[in-house]
Image (spheres, rainbow, N blue to C red):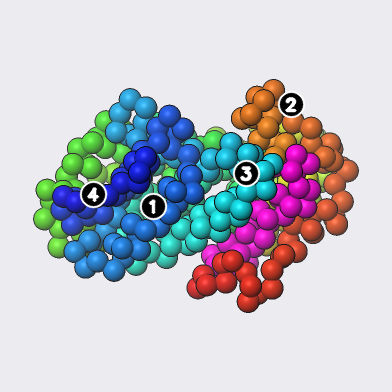
């Protein structure tokens, strides 16, 4: 068994038998992705892609007390906040390289198996939704909660959420609703379920099982899974009717006039989110539905640039959202505009205006 680590060992890349095994090893930060971690993951995947002795890749996250329990809570938002205020160029590099990594995962030519135990949010979804086998447990907590910090579901979120059935993508993207493991199967965001207590045994078996090829690694992992989904914890008819409406004002009006606990809870949650980014996210999901992966990631790279540069520094909606949640922790973001009804079409359109020409785009190389 060979292994390599980053200087701080936040990513452990090792070959066990004929399987490339990736471990996110930053448990105190819930395995939040740093630029160095993105680079380590990319380097390992590129090396194994061209190594005939490696048949497949499996990725997991280490928890605070055990070798599983937390997959990845997303990107390091405190770094985003600090870098945006300082004008640090590493912020731009992070998103360019993270989105390129997301594309690599989705297009990887060998089986890529994600053990999505515990928290799987934001950037954690970005390195797992492109997997050929997405495995959840009873501890899985999956979400794209970016509207709560004045951001949008990036890392390919437009692509994979818009592929959910009906208008479920709009609902999950706007609300950031968290899904349990078997709920994620019903939403089309996971492929199979395993009890978390069986994960160490499955991981250990990767080294000692004499696999013939990559497909046999995937079949072996799949043989341990249940594919039984949990019933959706929302009224599908109401969801389709409301989240198919043309804009955020109409969606909110429909929620306000629907007499159900789900509609009331959803309306309350949406009113806590950034009004501006709710409008932007609705447009994102609907544009992405007609896009391929590479074009979606290029669009999201444009959008995230605008998140930090349309209003630079502390004036950024994203910087303010992160401040309220993770820096000052007052949970009282000062959104601008403050109301869903006050967002203009021009403010939304600005997020989709690319700052780069096609031949200068930082993700122009994505196929």
Residue underneath mark 2: 332
Mark number, residue 225: none
Q: Residue furthest bottom?
A: 359
Distance Cα–Cα, label 4 vs label 2: 45 Å
**Region rendered in magenta:** 290-318
- Residue 83's label in the rendered image is 3
Q: CA distance from mark 3 to mark 2?
A: 22 Å
Choose mark 1 or mark 3, whichever is in front.
3
Q: Residue sitting at 79 percent across and 48 percent down?
A: 311
Near-viewer residue (300 or 84):
84
Q: Alpha-carbon distance for marks 1 and 4? A: 12 Å
- Closer to the camera, 325 or 9? 9
Q: Magenta: predominant secondary structure element?
A: helix
Query: Rounded to the nearest whole Å, what is the CA distance between mark 1 and mark 3?
Result: 21 Å
Q: Per the image, is 202 magenta? A: no
* Residue that label 1 marks: 40
The answer to which of marks 4 and 2 sits earlier in the sequence is: 4
Rendering coords of residue 257 (x, y %): 80, 35
Marker disc for residue 3 = 4
Q: Secondary structure at mark 4?
A: strand
Q: Residues within 10 Å of mark 3 (few under 14, many from 20)?
A: some
Rendered image quadrant of residue 11: top left
- Name the outermost residue toward the top: 330
């Amino acid at each position: 068994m060979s292994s390599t680590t980053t200087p701080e060992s936040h990513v452990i890349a090792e070959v066990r038998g004929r399987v490339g095994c990736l471990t996110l090893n930053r448990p105190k930060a819930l395995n939040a992705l740093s630029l160095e971690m993105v680079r380590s993951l990319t380097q390992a995947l590129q090396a194994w892609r061209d190594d005939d002795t490696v048949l497949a890749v499996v990725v997991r996250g280490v928890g605070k007390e055990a070798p599983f329990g937390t997959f990845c809570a997303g990107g390091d938002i405190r770094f985003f906040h600090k870098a945006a205020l300082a004008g640090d160029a590493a912020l731009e590099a992070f998103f360019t390289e993270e989105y390129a990594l997301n594309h690599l995962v989705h297009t990887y030519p060998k089986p890529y198996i994600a053990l999505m135990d515990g928290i799987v949010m934001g950037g954690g979804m970005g390195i797992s939704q492109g997997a050929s086998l997405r495995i959840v447990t009873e501890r899985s907590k999956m979400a794209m909660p970016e509207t709560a910090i004045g951001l949008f579901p990036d890392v390919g979120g437009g692509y994979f959420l818009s592929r959910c059935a009906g208008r479920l993508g709009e609902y999950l993207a706007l609300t950031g609703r968290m899904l349990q493991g078997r709920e994620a199967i019903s939403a089309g965001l996971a492929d199979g379920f395993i009890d978390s207590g069986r994960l160490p045994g499955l991981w250990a078996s990767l080294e000692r099982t004499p696999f013939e090829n990559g497909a046999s690694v995937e079949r072996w992992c799949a043989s341990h899974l249940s594919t039984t989904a949990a019933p959706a914890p929302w009224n599908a008819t109401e969801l389709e009717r409301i989240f198919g409406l043309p804009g955020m004002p109409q969606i909110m009006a429909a929620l306000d006039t629907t007499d159900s606990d789900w509609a009331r809870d959803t309306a309350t949650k949406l009113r806590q989110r950034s009004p501006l980014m709710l409008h932007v996210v609705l447009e994102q999901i609907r544009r992405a539905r007609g896009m391929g992966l590479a074009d979606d990631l290029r669009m999201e790279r444009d959008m995230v640039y605008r998140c930090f540069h349309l209003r630079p520094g502390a004036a950024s909606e994203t910087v303010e959202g992160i401040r309220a949640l993770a820096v000052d922790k007052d949970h009282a973001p000062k959104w601008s505009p403050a109301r869903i009804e006050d967002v203009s079409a021009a403010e939304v359109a600005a997020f989709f205006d690319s700052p780069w020409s096609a031949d200068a785009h930082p993700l122009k190389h994505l196929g």
